[in-house]
Amino acid sequence: MTKEILLEKITAKFGDAVSIDAESLDLTAVIINSLRSHELIRYLRDEEGFNFLTDVCGAHFPENDRSAQFAVIYHMHNWIAGFRVRIKSFLDGENPVIDSVYDLFLSANWQERETYDFYGIEFKNHPDLRRILNMDEMESFPMRKEFPLEDQGRTDKDDRYFGRLPQTNNLPNNN
């Protein structure tokens, strides 16, 4: 199996719903329409021998168009061929929803729950989609880039001790 052959097969089967992920460097990576992601993962498992779902994770891209502000990223591994592939699906920022792959890989259970817990991405047909690490009462999703990195109301720290000096014009006077 080579990267080129796999990408050719995927493109032939999924047409316009799939594109090559230019950001992937050496990893074989594709971007698939979120409505067909489940179908692609099933195809890779059943037809191409990708028998291990290594990871399911989320990402938030607030600078993207509203229709593609979230992404779900899958990493799959064909142990026999020693080959890996990354699948990325972009989701709407208002309502990030995608089909669960729990029915294909039981290991997706906790990986999808973690992605939901941190990003608020919902997985349709997941058997037990609830928070896994954060408190159930928590209303926000901590990995979203909607909040400042630090509490702006803190009064117990001095930025000078953290290498962050106030922004002033301290240029030398060349008179």
Image: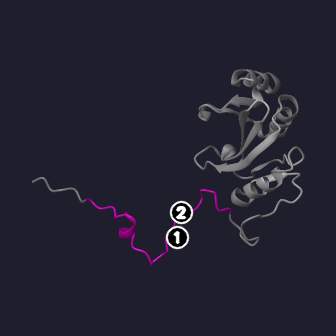
Q: Is residue 53 above or below residue 22?
A: below
Circle 1 sits on which residue? 151
- Which region is colored magenta? 141-169
Q: Quadrant of the N terminus?
A: top right
Q: Position of residue 95 (x, y in %)?
A: 75, 52
Q: CA distance from mark 2 to mark 1?
A: 7 Å
Question: Residue 5 in magenta?
Answer: no
The residue positioned 77% from the left and 53% from the top of the image is 111
* Amino acid under disc 1: Asp
43 and 91: which is toward the camera? 43
Q: Quadrant of the C terminus?
A: bottom left
Circle 2 sits on which residue? 148
Marks 2 and 1 in Cβ contact (< 8 Å): yes
Q: Position of residue 70 (x, y in %)?
A: 68, 48
Q: Position of residue 19 (x, y in %)?
A: 70, 29
Dot 1 alpha-carbon crowd within 10 angstroms: few under 14, some 14 to 19, many 20 or more: few
For numbered disc 1, what is the local secondary structure?
A: loop
For numbered disc 2, what is the local secondary structure?
A: loop
Question: Residue 142 in magenta?
Answer: yes
**Any mark on residue 51, and which?**
none
Q: Position of residue 123 (x, y in %)?
A: 82, 52
- Helix, strand or loop for the magenta stretch, by majority: loop
Coloured how? one colour
